[in-house]
Amino acid sequence: MVMALRTEHELHRRRRSRNVGLGIVLASFVVLVFALTVVKVRQGDLMEGFDHQPRVSVLPPEAPTASQQTEEAAE
Amino acid sequence: MTDIHAYENAPEAEFGDYVALLKPRVMSLVVFTAFVGLWVAPVDVHPVIAFCSVLFIALGGGASGALNMWYDADIDAVMRRTQKRPIPAGRVTGSEALAIGLTLSGFSVMMLGLAANWFAAAFLAFTIFFYAVVYTMWLKRWTPQNIVIGGAAGAFPPMIGWACATGGISLESVLMFALIFFWTPPHFWALALFMKEDYHKAGVPMLTVTHGRAATRRHIFAYTLVLAPFAIWLGLTSIGGPLYMAVAVVLNALFIHGGWRILRRDEQTAIADGYAVEKSVFKLSLYYLFLHFLALLVQSWMGTW
């Protein structure tokens, strides 16, 4: 007598619950970070990304050049 | 025909077992108090940022719960109430719980820092440390005052919520802390009076075991007296108002009365009526905390003083 193989075991249900659960958690996290990003950008929070330009705002104030010094002396 | 099992003894974990590691019932209290702390703060927070902040505070609380279950697996295995937890039941290994606890701790602190501010994140990190190390590893097995000092960990969430909005600490947030901090001992000791668990066998010094039940009754009453002024004081600050004040006065009168009734009973009377008073005071303590914070929420919506 040949018994049909049961392909679906209780163990599989438990594994699927872990996989589906983790999948939902990860997908929700992606949505959450995206929403957070949109809100933060709209609020105009300070962000200092690399933009391929020297950031003038953080450079030390330039020392006056020689020509400027002579102009000041003349005044 | 013989049965063939793909596993022996305990079955493999399902997703719910990992959720159970985070102590969802404790988490619900954290979510509520942290949300109130954030909402009543004088700084407006964008709803998405508020949602994320509360979520990551709750996740940090859950992470400390997992660390607690990892460290306390030996105690949990002895006591009947906790025997079905994932680790003592054998569905989740201790090292898995430790890994989840540590990972989620770091993750929740980092995400709270990015979502809200780094002061709130540092505060959350301290809270996790306080619950997992100071309470679980150190105080719980050493002193009967364990739940008094450990209660601080449960009292921090509204302060973290407040810090998410304001970036700091103020009198209001400290008083919200005090409200939970002084509420915890009478709440837990009322439970300890009627939940006759074998803390002794598990090696946990509970006040009921070390100093006796009469001393526990005195402690409960004393803490309800200490608690009341802080609850009223909170009503006099910038987040208080007539509604909160009315709720606080009524609830504290009831709670002190309950503490007094517990104090006036001895064990014989309590056993005779099946700890009816202790159970009703325990139930009252749940309403006490919930209604105080609900009143703060409604008060901020109605407008404060």
Image: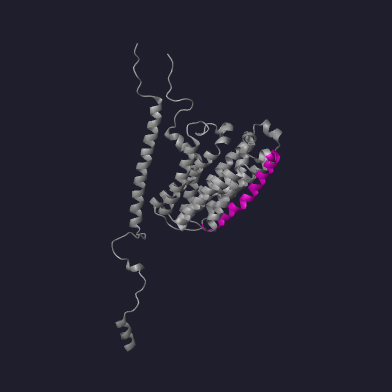
- Residue A58, placed above or below residue B182: below
| Vertical placement of residue A31 versus B165, above or below | above
Residue span colored magenta: B210-238
**Image x and y of residue A32, in percent:** 36, 47
Q: Quadrant of the N terminus of chain B?
A: top left
Q: Does the magenta stretch include residue B221?
A: yes
Question: In the image, is B121 to the left or to the right of B148?
Answer: left
In the displayed image of the protein, which residue is found farthest to the left?
Answer: A52
Q: Which of B40 and B100 is in front in this view?
A: B100
Q: Is the magenta stretch mostly helix, strand or loop?
A: helix
Left-right relation of B97 to B279: left
**Residue B95 included in the magenta stretch of the image:** no
Q: Residue A64 in the image: x percent, y percent?
A: 33, 79
Residue B263 percent coordinates (x, y): 69, 41
> Residue A68: which quarter of the image?
bottom left
Vertical relation: B36 (above or below) A57: above
Q: Nearer the viewer, residue B115 or B48?
A: B115
